[in-house]
């Protein structure tokens, strides 16, 4: 997030797109509801009706995969009415004329035809967002998990800069991360092309710095993303994998392809708390420990680094993940002699400029938000206050592109996937909780009442089929989805939505298109 969670409460306008916030990020949703109670205008754009839809001043349901067209249409109205922040655009951005030329083609009538959103709603969104003093954009995986995910994010950045909403309190562009420490994992180099702090592996100065610190030669070539690794396994380019705290046999798209790739490997190591569906395929399972059994830090969605303190000793033969990695590294010939997580954090601070002022003694209170550049730095509440990291903010002209797979006569429905309020990710933990498991015991497919009537379907088990696979799942008849759209939560391995989903990738970020694929629905009898 460019801004902080608490700032949402004081926003004048909040535009939520591609985020089912109350179910996936309920604590953040409470701030949004408080802002609404204080008088903030609320805009919700989501293909489904979500809980926040009932609080919204403007609530719209765009067709799946049409976010760029919608955002361009909003900017078209803003420019036509002269509502852009002219001073901000002139002093803090570049590329405006190219953006203006692209956006000129996306008039409300054209965009309405692409998105199915009424012209008057496009105009109202443009007015509320641009005319409010403090407007905040909030999005999640409904924006990113597309073959146009990078385009979607750039489009939101375009909108925020056009209206001068970046670098102000209670404004900004605010992605809500999918797990509690996914921000920290990325910050620490859990991406194939960077070291910690997003220092590029191909940058000679960065590589030299890490080589000197670690006393080891390092490649300048970026590694593979997860989906590229699975393809590499099928092609015989990858012989073994080491999977930590991840369950791709439920979480990744086109599970038939994932299973075939994993079974093509010569050796699999899984490090986890539970014997997950992925761990069941492993040659070796290393027992990791839970958050309550180890010391460390989490970095949350607002860039805040927070201490995690051990409450109990690791159970059974389990160990903290850092100790397992150190012991394994030593067995493979590279000694790692860290004595504690605190010592590791000190190394992070030495090698990572954005974490440069962070140490365990400074995290005793409420944590620190990076960038925190030195021991005297207080942390950063919101980003880009006076200038962007690159100097001027760059507008990116983006054209609408359809999803990789559209409905047709054979597969007339479009499927989108997501989370429920009860379960978390692949259900590895929540489905082992008796109280949570009893709250929602099985998966379901949401079907619009008119579609269900046409198919002769009631609350019964049905077959959902895509070009990649078939699942049997209970039908849930609801107006939360639009006609010809169905929704399945992905937590349930026995009715795994990702058997169906498309593994087509965004060409830049390599993120799969979880949010759109074509399916058909069949009665079982």
Image: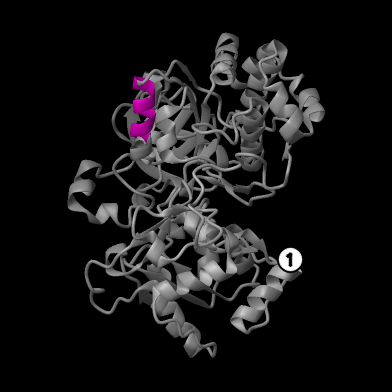
Instruction: Work out whether residue 395 can be spotted.
Output: no
User: Which residue appears farthest toward the top when viewing the image?
Assistant: 120
Q: Position of residue 14 (x, y in %)?
A: 48, 26
Is residue 351 something one can see in this rendering?
A: yes
Residue at the outermost front position: 376
Residue drawn 63% across the image and 66% down it: 232
Q: Nearer the viewer, residue 338 or 437?
A: 338
Question: Which residue appears at 65% of the width and 62% of the height?
Answer: 199
Q: Residue 36: where, in percent of width, then height?
A: 38, 22
Could you say which is closer to the camera, residue 454 or residue 477? 477
Position of the C terminus by quadrant: top left
Vertical side of 458 occupied by 253: above or below: below
Crowdedness near tag 1: few (<14), some (14–19) or many (≥20) residues, C-alpha within 10 Å = few
The residue shown at (31%, 69%) is 294
Residue annotated with mark 1 = 203
The image quadrant of residue 364 is: bottom left
- From the viewer's perspective, is residue 346 above or below residue 93? below
Above or below: residue 488 compared with residue 10: below
- Res. 286 image quadrant: bottom left
Helix, strand or loop at mark 1 = loop
Of 58 and 493, the residue lying toward us: 58
Q: What stretch is highlighted in magenta?
A: 29-37
| Relative horizontal placement of residue 387, taking residue 316 as reference (left or right) | right
188 shown above or below 81? below
Residue 501 picture location, percent across and down: 52, 45
Q: Which residue is drawn at 28% across and 30% down?
A: 459
Dominant secondary structure (helix, strand or loop) of the stretch shown in magenta: helix
């Amino acid at each position: 997030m460019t801004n902080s969670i608490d700032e949402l409460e004081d926003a004048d306008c909040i535009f939520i797109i591609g985020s089912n916030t109350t179910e996936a990020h309920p604590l953040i949703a409470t701030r949004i509801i408080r802002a609404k109670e204080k008088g903030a205008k609320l805009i919700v754009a989501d293909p489904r009706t979500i809980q926040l839809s009932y609080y919204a001043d403007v609530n719209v349901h765009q067709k799946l995969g049409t976010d760029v067209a919608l955002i361009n249409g909003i900017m078209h109205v803003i420019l036509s009415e002269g509502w852009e922040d002219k001073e901000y655009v002139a002093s803090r951005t570049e590329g405006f004329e190219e953006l203006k030329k692209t956006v000129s083609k996306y008039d409300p009538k054209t965009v309405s035809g692409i998105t199915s959103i009424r012209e008057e709603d496009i105009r109202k969104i443009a007015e509320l967002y641009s005319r409010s003093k403090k407007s905040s954009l909030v999005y999640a995986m409904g924006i990113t998990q597309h073959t146009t995910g990078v385009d979607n994010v750039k489009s939101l950045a375009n909108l925020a800069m056009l209206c001068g909403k970046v670098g102000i309190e209670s404004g900004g562009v605010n992605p809500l991360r999918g797990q509690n420490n996914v921000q920290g994992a990325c910050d620490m180099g859990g991406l194939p092309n960077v070291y910690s702090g997003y220092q590029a592996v191909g940058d000679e100065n960065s590589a030299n710095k890490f080589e000197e610190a670690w006393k080891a030669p390092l490649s300048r070539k970026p590694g593979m993303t997860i989906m590229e690794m699975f393809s590499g396994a099928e092609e015989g380019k990858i012989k073994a994998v080491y999977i930590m705290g991840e369950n791709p046999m439920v979480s990744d798209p086109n599970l038939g392809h994932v299973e075939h790739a994993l079974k093509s490997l010569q050796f699999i190591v899984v490090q986890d708390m539970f014997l997950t569906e992925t761990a069941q395929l492993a040659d070796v399972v290393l027992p990791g420990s839970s958050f309550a059994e180890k010391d460390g830090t989490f970095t949350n969605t607002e860039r805040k680094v927070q201490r995690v303190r051990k409450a109990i000793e690791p159970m059974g033969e389990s160990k903290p993940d850092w100790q397992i990695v150190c012991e394994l590294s030593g067995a493979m010939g590279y000694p790692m002699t860290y004595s504690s997580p605190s010592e590791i954090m000190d190394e992070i601070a030495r090698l990572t400029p954005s974490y440069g002022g962070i140490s365990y003694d400074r995290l005793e209170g409420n944590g620190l938000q990076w960038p925190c550049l030195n021991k005297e730095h207080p942390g950063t509440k919101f980003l880009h206050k006076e200038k962007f990291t690159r100097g001027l903010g760059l507008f990116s002209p983006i054209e609408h592109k359809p999803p990789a797979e559209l409905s047709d006569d054979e597969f007339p429905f479009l499927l989108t996937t997501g989370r429920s309020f009860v379960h978390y990710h692949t259900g590895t933990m929540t489905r082992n909780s008796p109280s949570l498991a009893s709250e929602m015991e099985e998966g379901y497919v949401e079907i619009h009442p008119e579609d269900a009537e046409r198919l002769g379907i009631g609350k019964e088990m049905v077959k959902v089929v895509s070009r990649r696979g078939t699942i049997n799942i209970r039908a849930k008849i609801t107006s939360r989805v639009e006609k010809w759209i169905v929704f399945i939560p992905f937590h349930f391995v026995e009715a795994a939505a990702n058997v169906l989903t498309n593994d087509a990738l965004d060409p830049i970020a390599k993120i799969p298109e979880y949010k759109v694929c074509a399916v058909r629905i069949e009665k079982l009898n």
